[in-house]
Image (cartoon, helix red, strand yellow):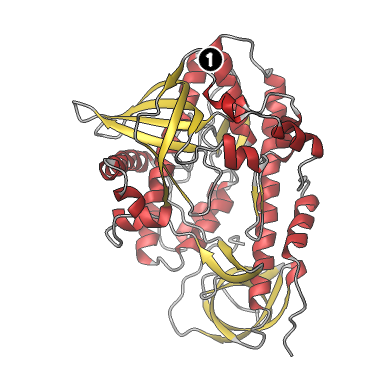
Protein backbone atom coordinates (compact mmCIF):
# COMPACT_ATOMS: atom_id res chain seq x y z
CA UNK A 1 0.00 0.00 0.00
CA UNK A 2 1.36 3.39 -0.96
CA UNK A 3 1.95 5.86 1.85
CA UNK A 4 0.32 9.11 0.76
CA UNK A 5 0.15 10.79 4.16
CA UNK A 6 0.59 14.53 3.67
CA UNK A 7 4.15 15.85 3.87
CA UNK A 8 4.36 19.46 5.02
CA UNK A 9 7.44 20.51 3.11
CA UNK A 10 7.21 24.12 4.25
CA UNK A 11 7.24 23.03 7.91
CA UNK A 12 10.25 20.77 7.30
CA UNK A 13 12.05 23.65 5.55
CA UNK A 14 11.40 26.02 8.46
CA UNK A 15 12.61 23.43 10.94
CA UNK A 16 15.78 23.05 8.86
CA UNK A 17 16.32 26.81 8.91
CA UNK A 18 16.05 26.91 12.69
CA UNK A 19 18.22 23.81 13.13
CA UNK A 20 21.07 25.52 11.29
CA UNK A 21 20.74 28.79 13.17
CA UNK A 22 18.68 30.92 10.78
CA UNK A 23 15.65 33.06 11.56
CA UNK A 24 13.08 31.99 8.95
CA UNK A 25 10.64 34.82 9.61
CA UNK A 26 11.17 38.57 9.50
CA UNK A 27 10.51 40.26 12.86
CA UNK A 28 7.64 42.76 12.95
CA UNK A 29 10.14 45.57 13.54
CA UNK A 30 11.80 44.76 10.21
CA UNK A 31 8.52 44.67 8.32
CA UNK A 32 7.42 48.00 9.84
CA UNK A 33 10.74 49.59 8.94
CA UNK A 34 10.63 48.38 5.34
CA UNK A 35 7.00 49.43 4.88
CA UNK A 36 7.99 53.05 5.60
CA UNK A 37 10.54 53.26 2.78
CA UNK A 38 9.31 55.59 0.05
CA UNK A 39 9.84 54.28 -3.46
CA UNK A 40 10.18 57.85 -4.74
CA UNK A 41 13.54 58.03 -2.95
CA UNK A 42 15.01 55.90 -5.74
CA UNK A 43 15.62 59.00 -7.84
CA UNK A 44 17.26 61.00 -5.04
CA UNK A 45 20.57 62.31 -6.32
CA UNK A 46 23.68 62.37 -4.15
CA UNK A 47 27.22 63.23 -5.13
CA UNK A 48 28.30 61.66 -8.39
CA UNK A 49 25.03 59.94 -9.26
CA UNK A 50 24.92 59.58 -13.02
CA UNK A 51 21.77 59.18 -15.08
CA UNK A 52 22.46 56.06 -17.19
CA UNK A 53 18.90 55.10 -18.02
CA UNK A 54 19.56 55.58 -21.74
CA UNK A 55 22.03 52.68 -21.91
CA UNK A 56 20.96 49.25 -23.16
CA UNK A 57 20.92 47.49 -19.79
CA UNK A 58 19.62 43.93 -19.51
CA UNK A 59 19.74 41.10 -16.98
CA UNK A 60 20.02 37.32 -17.33
CA UNK A 61 18.64 35.16 -14.54
CA UNK A 62 16.36 32.24 -13.76
CA UNK A 63 12.89 32.50 -15.29
CA UNK A 64 11.23 33.03 -11.88
CA UNK A 65 13.84 35.25 -10.23
CA UNK A 66 12.69 38.65 -9.05
CA UNK A 67 15.58 39.54 -6.71
CA UNK A 68 17.72 40.95 -9.52
CA UNK A 69 21.12 42.16 -8.31
CA UNK A 70 22.83 43.17 -11.53
CA UNK A 71 22.35 44.43 -15.08
CA UNK A 72 25.02 44.70 -17.76
CA UNK A 73 25.89 46.53 -20.94
CA UNK A 74 28.98 46.70 -23.17
CA UNK A 75 30.44 49.16 -25.63
CA UNK A 76 33.02 48.35 -28.33
CA UNK A 77 36.18 50.45 -28.57
CA UNK A 78 38.22 51.58 -31.55
CA UNK A 79 41.19 49.25 -30.85
CA UNK A 80 39.24 46.02 -30.33
CA UNK A 81 38.77 46.61 -26.61
CA UNK A 82 35.31 46.39 -25.02
CA UNK A 83 34.10 48.63 -22.19
CA UNK A 84 31.94 46.72 -19.72
CA UNK A 85 29.52 48.32 -17.29
CA UNK A 86 27.97 46.20 -14.54
CA UNK A 87 25.34 47.91 -12.40
CA UNK A 88 24.78 46.44 -8.94
CA UNK A 89 21.65 47.08 -6.86
CA UNK A 90 22.29 49.87 -4.31
CA UNK A 91 20.89 47.89 -1.38
CA UNK A 92 22.75 49.89 1.26
CA UNK A 93 20.73 52.97 0.26
CA UNK A 94 17.59 51.29 1.62
CA UNK A 95 19.20 49.28 4.46
CA UNK A 96 21.17 51.62 6.74
CA UNK A 97 23.85 50.16 8.98
CA UNK A 98 22.47 49.00 12.36
CA UNK A 99 18.84 49.35 11.26
CA UNK A 100 16.44 46.56 12.23
CA UNK A 101 16.56 45.26 8.67
CA UNK A 102 20.34 45.36 8.67
CA UNK A 103 20.66 43.44 11.93
CA UNK A 104 18.35 40.68 10.72
CA UNK A 105 20.20 40.45 7.38
CA UNK A 106 23.54 40.31 9.19
CA UNK A 107 22.31 37.45 11.38
CA UNK A 108 21.13 35.25 8.50
CA UNK A 109 23.92 36.43 6.20
CA UNK A 110 22.40 35.08 3.02
CA UNK A 111 19.20 34.13 1.26
CA UNK A 112 18.64 30.39 1.68
CA UNK A 113 17.29 28.49 -1.33
CA UNK A 114 15.73 25.26 -0.11
CA UNK A 115 13.99 24.29 -3.33
CA UNK A 116 10.59 23.80 -1.76
CA UNK A 117 10.76 27.32 -0.35
CA UNK A 118 13.11 30.30 -0.47
CA UNK A 119 13.99 32.30 2.63
CA UNK A 120 15.19 35.71 1.42
CA UNK A 121 17.75 37.72 3.35
CA UNK A 122 15.66 40.86 2.83
CA UNK A 123 11.86 41.29 2.76
CA UNK A 124 10.24 40.97 -0.65
CA UNK A 125 9.39 44.69 -0.79
CA UNK A 126 13.13 45.29 -0.96
CA UNK A 127 14.75 42.28 -2.63
CA UNK A 128 11.95 41.73 -5.16
CA UNK A 129 10.88 45.36 -5.29
CA UNK A 130 12.54 48.70 -4.79
CA UNK A 131 16.12 47.42 -4.46
CA UNK A 132 15.75 44.90 -7.31
CA UNK A 133 16.87 45.90 -10.81
CA UNK A 134 13.56 44.86 -12.35
CA UNK A 135 12.79 45.52 -16.01
CA UNK A 136 10.83 48.60 -16.99
CA UNK A 137 11.50 50.70 -13.89
CA UNK A 138 14.15 53.16 -12.73
CA UNK A 139 16.50 51.82 -10.06
CA UNK A 140 19.50 52.91 -8.00
CA UNK A 141 22.79 51.11 -8.63
CA UNK A 142 26.51 51.14 -8.04
CA UNK A 143 28.06 51.03 -11.52
CA UNK A 144 31.37 49.24 -12.07
CA UNK A 145 33.44 49.84 -15.19
CA UNK A 146 36.28 47.82 -16.66
CA UNK A 147 37.77 47.28 -20.10
CA UNK A 148 38.53 43.90 -21.66
CA UNK A 149 41.30 43.74 -24.25
CA UNK A 150 41.25 41.33 -27.22
CA UNK A 151 43.54 38.93 -25.35
CA UNK A 152 41.33 38.90 -22.26
CA UNK A 153 43.38 41.22 -20.04
CA UNK A 154 41.22 43.42 -17.80
CA UNK A 155 41.85 47.10 -17.14
CA UNK A 156 39.87 47.97 -14.03
CA UNK A 157 38.08 51.30 -14.06
CA UNK A 158 36.05 53.13 -11.45
CA UNK A 159 32.80 52.64 -9.53
CA UNK A 160 30.14 55.30 -9.05
CA UNK A 161 26.47 55.78 -8.21
CA UNK A 162 23.96 55.65 -11.03
CA UNK A 163 20.30 55.50 -12.00
CA UNK A 164 19.63 52.64 -14.43
CA UNK A 165 16.68 51.18 -16.33
CA UNK A 166 16.64 47.46 -17.16
CA UNK A 167 15.39 47.11 -20.75
CA UNK A 168 14.86 43.30 -20.64
CA UNK A 169 14.89 40.45 -18.14
CA UNK A 170 16.33 37.47 -20.00
CA UNK A 171 16.32 33.80 -19.03
CA UNK A 172 19.42 31.59 -18.84
CA UNK A 173 17.99 28.63 -20.73
CA UNK A 174 16.55 30.69 -23.59
CA UNK A 175 19.61 32.85 -24.12
CA UNK A 176 21.97 29.90 -23.70
CA UNK A 177 20.17 27.80 -26.33
CA UNK A 178 20.14 30.74 -28.76
CA UNK A 179 23.85 31.53 -28.36
CA UNK A 180 24.76 27.84 -28.67
CA UNK A 181 22.69 27.45 -31.84
CA UNK A 182 20.15 25.02 -30.41
CA UNK A 183 17.24 27.42 -30.05
CA UNK A 184 15.71 30.53 -31.64
CA UNK A 185 16.45 34.07 -30.60
CA UNK A 186 14.35 34.75 -27.46
CA UNK A 187 11.41 37.14 -28.02
CA UNK A 188 12.66 39.19 -25.07
CA UNK A 189 15.85 39.84 -27.07
CA UNK A 190 14.35 40.47 -30.50
CA UNK A 191 11.73 42.83 -29.06
CA UNK A 192 14.37 45.38 -27.97
CA UNK A 193 16.21 47.19 -30.78
CA UNK A 194 19.95 46.63 -30.56
CA UNK A 195 19.75 44.00 -27.81
CA UNK A 196 20.77 41.10 -30.07
CA UNK A 197 24.04 42.85 -30.91
CA UNK A 198 24.48 43.79 -27.24
CA UNK A 199 24.16 40.20 -25.98
CA UNK A 200 26.52 38.94 -28.69
CA UNK A 201 29.03 41.58 -27.56
CA UNK A 202 28.67 40.37 -23.97
CA UNK A 203 29.30 36.84 -25.20
CA UNK A 204 32.46 37.98 -26.95
CA UNK A 205 33.65 39.54 -23.67
CA UNK A 206 32.87 36.25 -21.96
CA UNK A 207 34.94 34.23 -24.43
CA UNK A 208 37.90 36.55 -23.88
CA UNK A 209 37.67 36.52 -20.09
CA UNK A 210 37.09 32.78 -19.86
CA UNK A 211 39.95 31.87 -22.21
CA UNK A 212 42.29 34.17 -20.27
CA UNK A 213 41.36 32.61 -16.90
CA UNK A 214 41.66 29.08 -18.24
CA UNK A 215 45.18 29.81 -19.48
CA UNK A 216 46.05 30.91 -15.95
CA UNK A 217 44.74 27.63 -14.48
CA UNK A 218 41.09 28.25 -13.62
CA UNK A 219 39.31 24.98 -12.80
CA UNK A 220 36.29 24.03 -14.90
CA UNK A 221 34.39 21.94 -12.36
CA UNK A 222 30.90 20.46 -12.66
CA UNK A 223 28.91 19.08 -9.74
CA UNK A 224 25.35 17.79 -9.78
CA UNK A 225 22.82 19.43 -7.50
CA UNK A 226 19.32 18.27 -8.34
CA UNK A 227 16.70 20.86 -7.39
CA UNK A 228 13.03 20.02 -6.85
CA UNK A 229 10.48 21.17 -9.40
CA UNK A 230 7.39 22.01 -7.39
CA UNK A 231 3.78 21.62 -8.55
CA UNK A 232 0.76 22.23 -6.31
CA UNK A 233 2.94 22.12 -3.20
CA UNK A 234 4.45 18.72 -4.04
CA UNK A 235 7.71 17.58 -5.63
CA UNK A 236 6.95 16.95 -9.30
CA UNK A 237 10.49 16.21 -10.50
CA UNK A 238 14.18 16.73 -9.80
CA UNK A 239 16.00 18.96 -12.28
CA UNK A 240 19.70 19.62 -12.79
CA UNK A 241 20.80 23.15 -13.60
CA UNK A 242 22.88 22.89 -16.76
CA UNK A 243 25.85 25.14 -17.42
CA UNK A 244 25.42 27.07 -20.67
CA UNK A 245 26.65 30.12 -22.56
CA UNK A 246 24.28 32.50 -20.77
CA UNK A 247 25.41 31.39 -17.32
CA UNK A 248 28.99 31.80 -18.45
CA UNK A 249 28.25 35.41 -19.41
CA UNK A 250 27.09 36.24 -15.90
CA UNK A 251 29.87 34.23 -14.26
CA UNK A 252 32.67 35.89 -16.21
CA UNK A 253 31.28 39.43 -16.07
CA UNK A 254 30.80 39.14 -12.30
CA UNK A 255 34.27 37.68 -11.66
CA UNK A 256 35.78 40.69 -13.42
CA UNK A 257 33.40 43.09 -11.65
CA UNK A 258 34.39 41.68 -8.26
CA UNK A 259 38.01 42.19 -9.24
CA UNK A 260 37.18 45.83 -9.99
CA UNK A 261 35.73 46.23 -6.49
CA UNK A 262 38.96 44.88 -4.96
CA UNK A 263 40.97 47.18 -7.23
CA UNK A 264 39.05 50.31 -6.17
CA UNK A 265 39.13 49.49 -2.45
CA UNK A 266 42.77 48.48 -2.71
CA UNK A 267 43.74 51.74 -4.42
CA UNK A 268 42.02 53.58 -1.57
CA UNK A 269 44.12 51.58 0.92
CA UNK A 270 41.12 50.45 2.97
CA UNK A 271 40.33 47.06 4.54
CA UNK A 272 37.73 44.82 2.95
CA UNK A 273 36.33 41.30 2.99
CA UNK A 274 37.74 39.04 0.29
CA UNK A 275 36.50 35.73 -1.04
CA UNK A 276 39.20 33.05 -1.09
CA UNK A 277 39.82 29.39 -1.83
CA UNK A 278 43.14 28.44 -0.26
CA UNK A 279 45.86 26.41 -1.94
CA UNK A 280 44.68 22.84 -1.20
CA UNK A 281 46.00 21.35 2.04
CA UNK A 282 45.06 17.89 0.75
CA UNK A 283 46.94 18.20 -2.54
CA UNK A 284 48.34 14.71 -1.95
CA UNK A 285 44.78 13.39 -2.13
CA UNK A 286 44.25 15.20 -5.43
CA UNK A 287 47.52 13.72 -6.73
CA UNK A 288 46.34 10.25 -5.67
CA UNK A 289 42.99 10.81 -7.38
CA UNK A 290 44.70 11.74 -10.65
CA UNK A 291 46.98 8.71 -10.35
CA UNK A 292 43.87 6.48 -10.42
CA UNK A 293 43.55 7.64 -14.03
CA UNK A 294 47.27 7.31 -14.78
CA UNK A 295 47.68 11.08 -14.77
CA UNK A 296 50.68 12.46 -12.91
CA UNK A 297 50.28 15.75 -11.07
CA UNK A 298 53.26 17.62 -9.58
CA UNK A 299 53.99 17.22 -5.86
CA UNK A 300 53.28 20.91 -5.20
CA UNK A 301 49.85 22.49 -5.86
CA UNK A 302 49.56 23.54 -9.49
CA UNK A 303 46.19 24.79 -10.75
CA UNK A 304 47.25 24.66 -14.42
CA UNK A 305 48.19 20.98 -14.16
CA UNK A 306 44.97 20.20 -12.29
CA UNK A 307 42.94 22.05 -14.91
CA UNK A 308 44.57 19.95 -17.65
CA UNK A 309 43.69 16.74 -15.78
CA UNK A 310 40.07 17.85 -15.34
CA UNK A 311 39.72 18.80 -19.00
CA UNK A 312 41.05 15.37 -19.99
CA UNK A 313 38.60 13.54 -17.74
CA UNK A 314 35.63 15.62 -18.87
CA UNK A 315 36.32 14.61 -22.46
CA UNK A 316 37.01 10.96 -21.64
CA UNK A 317 34.10 10.30 -19.28
CA UNK A 318 31.53 13.14 -19.08
CA UNK A 319 28.98 10.94 -17.26
CA UNK A 320 31.23 10.44 -14.24
CA UNK A 321 32.88 13.86 -14.40
CA UNK A 322 30.49 15.48 -11.87
CA UNK A 323 31.48 12.91 -9.25
CA UNK A 324 35.16 13.46 -9.95
CA UNK A 325 34.51 17.21 -9.62
CA UNK A 326 32.91 16.64 -6.23
CA UNK A 327 36.00 14.70 -5.13
CA UNK A 328 38.27 17.59 -6.17
CA UNK A 329 36.03 20.20 -4.54
CA UNK A 330 36.10 18.38 -1.21
CA UNK A 331 39.85 17.85 -1.33
CA UNK A 332 40.43 21.53 -2.17
CA UNK A 333 38.39 22.74 0.76
CA UNK A 334 35.59 25.30 0.96
CA UNK A 335 35.52 28.91 -0.07
CA UNK A 336 35.87 31.35 2.79
CA UNK A 337 35.49 35.01 3.61
CA UNK A 338 38.51 36.71 5.17
CA UNK A 339 39.18 40.26 6.31
CA UNK A 340 41.93 41.75 4.20
CA UNK A 341 43.92 44.66 5.61
CA UNK A 342 46.24 46.74 3.40
CA UNK A 343 49.71 45.28 3.66
CA UNK A 344 48.50 41.70 4.03
CA UNK A 345 49.61 39.14 1.47
CA UNK A 346 46.60 38.19 -0.70
CA UNK A 347 45.52 34.56 -0.42
CA UNK A 348 43.65 34.43 -3.71
CA UNK A 349 41.05 32.08 -5.16
CA UNK A 350 42.72 28.84 -6.27
CA UNK A 351 39.76 27.55 -8.30
CA UNK A 352 39.16 30.80 -10.22
CA UNK A 353 42.89 31.41 -10.74
CA UNK A 354 42.60 35.01 -9.52
CA UNK A 355 44.44 36.74 -6.69
CA UNK A 356 42.17 39.70 -5.91
CA UNK A 357 38.59 38.56 -5.52
CA UNK A 358 35.59 39.34 -3.36
CA UNK A 359 31.80 39.12 -3.37
CA UNK A 360 30.08 42.39 -4.20
CA UNK A 361 27.63 41.69 -7.04
CA UNK A 362 24.63 40.18 -5.18
CA UNK A 363 23.70 42.50 -2.27
CA UNK A 364 20.03 41.48 -2.32
CA UNK A 365 21.10 37.91 -1.54
CA UNK A 366 24.43 38.10 0.39
CA UNK A 367 25.31 40.31 3.33
CA UNK A 368 29.04 40.35 2.52
CA UNK A 369 28.19 42.30 -0.62
CA UNK A 370 26.43 44.97 1.45
CA UNK A 371 29.49 45.26 3.69
CA UNK A 372 31.78 45.86 0.72
CA UNK A 373 29.24 48.28 -0.76
CA UNK A 374 29.39 50.38 2.41
CA UNK A 375 33.19 50.38 2.36
CA UNK A 376 33.06 51.55 -1.26
CA UNK A 377 30.72 54.43 -0.42
CA UNK A 378 33.01 55.56 2.38
CA UNK A 379 35.79 55.77 -0.22
CA UNK A 380 33.61 57.64 -2.73
CA UNK A 381 32.30 60.09 -0.12
CA UNK A 382 35.62 60.43 1.73
CA UNK A 383 33.95 59.60 5.04
CA UNK A 384 34.97 57.42 7.99
CA UNK A 385 34.97 53.68 7.35
CA UNK A 386 31.86 51.96 8.75
CA UNK A 387 33.84 48.97 10.04
CA UNK A 388 37.12 48.50 11.89
CA UNK A 389 39.50 45.68 10.87
CA UNK A 390 38.50 43.78 14.02
CA UNK A 391 34.78 44.01 13.18
CA UNK A 392 35.47 43.01 9.57
CA UNK A 393 37.31 39.93 10.81
CA UNK A 394 34.36 38.95 13.03
CA UNK A 395 31.91 39.53 10.18
CA UNK A 396 34.02 37.48 7.75
CA UNK A 397 34.06 34.53 10.16
CA UNK A 398 30.30 34.79 10.72
CA UNK A 399 29.52 35.04 7.01
CA UNK A 400 31.65 31.95 6.32
CA UNK A 401 29.71 30.13 9.04
CA UNK A 402 26.35 31.23 7.60
CA UNK A 403 27.34 30.08 4.12
CA UNK A 404 28.29 26.63 5.39
CA UNK A 405 25.03 26.44 7.36
CA UNK A 406 22.99 27.38 4.28
CA UNK A 407 24.72 24.68 2.25
CA UNK A 408 23.90 22.09 4.93
CA UNK A 409 20.25 23.16 4.96
CA UNK A 410 20.09 23.04 1.16
CA UNK A 411 21.65 19.56 1.02
CA UNK A 412 19.22 18.29 3.63
CA UNK A 413 16.20 19.63 1.74
CA UNK A 414 17.44 18.08 -1.52
CA UNK A 415 17.39 14.74 0.30
CA UNK A 416 13.89 15.47 1.61
CA UNK A 417 12.68 16.34 -1.89
CA UNK A 418 14.17 13.14 -3.30
CA UNK A 419 12.47 11.08 -0.59
CA UNK A 420 9.13 12.72 -1.37
CA UNK A 421 9.47 12.13 -5.11
CA UNK A 422 10.41 8.46 -4.69
CA UNK A 423 7.99 7.47 -1.95
CA UNK A 424 5.50 5.96 -4.43
CA UNK A 425 8.23 3.92 -6.17
CA UNK A 426 9.09 1.40 -3.46
CA UNK A 427 10.26 -1.86 -5.07
CA UNK A 428 11.24 -0.30 -8.39
CA UNK A 429 14.76 -0.68 -9.80
CA UNK A 430 16.99 2.10 -11.12
CA UNK A 431 20.27 2.52 -12.95
CA UNK A 432 22.70 4.30 -10.62
CA UNK A 433 26.33 5.26 -10.08
CA UNK A 434 28.20 4.78 -6.81
CA UNK A 435 29.18 8.20 -5.41
CA UNK A 436 30.54 7.22 -2.00
CA UNK A 437 31.93 4.05 -0.42
CA UNK A 438 33.25 4.47 3.10
CA UNK A 439 32.79 2.90 6.51
CA UNK A 440 30.00 5.34 7.29
CA UNK A 441 28.02 4.16 4.28
CA UNK A 442 27.79 3.50 0.57
CA UNK A 443 25.84 5.99 -1.54
CA UNK A 444 24.51 6.07 -5.08
CA UNK A 445 23.03 8.64 -7.43
CA UNK A 446 20.23 7.50 -9.70
CA UNK A 447 20.50 8.29 -13.39
CA UNK A 448 16.82 9.21 -13.60
CA UNK A 449 15.57 10.86 -11.48
CA UNK A 450 18.94 12.25 -10.23
CA UNK A 451 18.21 11.40 -6.59
CA UNK A 452 20.78 10.22 -4.06
CA UNK A 453 20.43 7.59 -1.37
CA UNK A 454 22.22 4.95 0.68
CA UNK A 455 22.75 1.31 -0.23
CA UNK A 456 21.91 -0.70 2.91
CA UNK A 457 21.78 -4.18 1.38
CA UNK A 458 24.50 -5.72 -0.83
CA UNK A 459 26.80 -2.70 -0.55
CA UNK A 460 29.97 -4.67 0.25
CA UNK A 461 32.60 -4.45 -2.46
CA UNK A 462 31.04 -1.55 -4.37
CA UNK A 463 33.48 1.02 -5.72
CA UNK A 464 33.06 4.72 -6.29
CA UNK A 465 32.31 5.36 -9.97
CA UNK A 466 30.84 1.89 -10.51
CA UNK A 467 27.53 1.61 -12.35
CA UNK A 468 24.94 -0.54 -10.62
CA UNK A 469 21.25 -1.39 -10.56
CA UNK A 470 19.51 -0.71 -7.24
CA UNK A 471 16.05 -1.44 -5.86
CA UNK A 472 14.28 1.15 -3.73
CA UNK A 473 13.58 -0.24 -0.26
CA UNK A 474 12.16 2.70 1.68
CA UNK A 475 11.99 6.47 2.06
CA UNK A 476 11.57 8.71 5.10
CA UNK A 477 10.90 12.25 3.81
CA UNK A 478 11.03 14.15 7.15
CA UNK A 479 14.50 12.71 7.77
CA UNK A 480 15.64 12.85 4.15
CA UNK A 481 16.38 9.10 4.07
CA UNK A 482 16.32 7.06 0.84
CA UNK A 483 17.48 3.43 1.16
CA UNK A 484 18.36 0.99 -1.62
CA UNK A 485 19.38 -2.64 -2.07
CA UNK A 486 21.85 -3.73 -4.72
CA UNK A 487 19.90 -5.44 -7.52
CA UNK A 488 22.69 -5.97 -10.04
CA UNK A 489 25.88 -4.62 -11.52
CA UNK A 490 26.26 -2.92 -14.84
CA UNK A 491 28.29 -4.80 -17.42
CA UNK A 492 29.72 -1.55 -18.70
CA UNK A 493 33.30 -0.75 -17.75
CA UNK A 494 33.64 1.64 -14.81
CA UNK A 495 36.46 3.61 -13.28
CA UNK A 496 37.24 4.28 -9.65
CA UNK A 497 37.22 7.70 -8.10
CA UNK A 498 39.00 8.66 -4.92
CA UNK A 499 37.11 7.17 -1.91
CA UNK A 500 36.73 10.56 -0.25
CA UNK A 501 34.18 11.66 -2.81
CA UNK A 502 31.38 11.51 -0.33
Asked if 454 appears above or below 364 in the picture, the reply is below
**What residue do we see at 39% from left, 42% from top?**
217
On the picture, is 401 further left or further right than 498?
Answer: right
- Residue nearer the viewer, 36 or 432: 36
Asked if 223 appears above or below 348 in the picture, the reply is below
* Residue wearing tag 1: 46
Q: Position of residue 177 (x, y in %)?
A: 34, 58
**What residue do we see at 47% from left, 45% from top?**
299
On the picture, is 385 further left or further right than 297?
Answer: right
- Residue nearer the viewer, 385 or 169: 169
Q: Position of residue 443 (x, y in %)?
A: 63, 71
For the residue labelled by badge 1, is the local secondary structure a helix, a strand or a loop? loop
Quick one: quadrant of the N terminus? Answer: bottom right
Asked if 419 appears above or below 130 in the picture, the reply is below
- Residue nearer the viewer, 61 or 215: 61
Q: Position of residue 341 (x, y in %)?
A: 60, 19
Q: Position of residue 291 (x, y in %)?
A: 46, 59
Residue 275 location, quadrant: top right
Residue 462 location, quadrant: bottom right
- Of all residues, the one furthest to the bottom in this rendering is 1
On the picture, is 244 further left or further right than 230?
Answer: left
Label 1 CA crowd tier, 10 Å (few <14, some 14–19, many 20+): few
**What residue do we see at 36% from left, 58% from top?**
312
Callout count:
1
Can residue 269 be seen here? The reply is no
**What residue do we see at 62% from left, 62% from top?**
502
Amino acid sequence: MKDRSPINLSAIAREAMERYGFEPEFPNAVMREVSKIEESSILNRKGDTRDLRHLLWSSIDNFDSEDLDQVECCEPGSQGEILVRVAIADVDFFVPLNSETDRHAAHNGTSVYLGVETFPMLPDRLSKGISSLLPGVDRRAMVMEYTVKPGGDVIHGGIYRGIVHNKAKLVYEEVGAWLEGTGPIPPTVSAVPGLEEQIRLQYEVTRRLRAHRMKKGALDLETIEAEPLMKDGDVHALVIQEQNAARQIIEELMVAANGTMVHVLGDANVPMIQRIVRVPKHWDGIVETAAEYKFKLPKEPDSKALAKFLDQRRSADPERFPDLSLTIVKLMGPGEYVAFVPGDTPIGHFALAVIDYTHSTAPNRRYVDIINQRLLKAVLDKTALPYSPRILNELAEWMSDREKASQKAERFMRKVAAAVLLRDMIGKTFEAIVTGAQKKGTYVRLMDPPAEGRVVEGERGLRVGQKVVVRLLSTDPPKGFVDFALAGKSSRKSRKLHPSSR
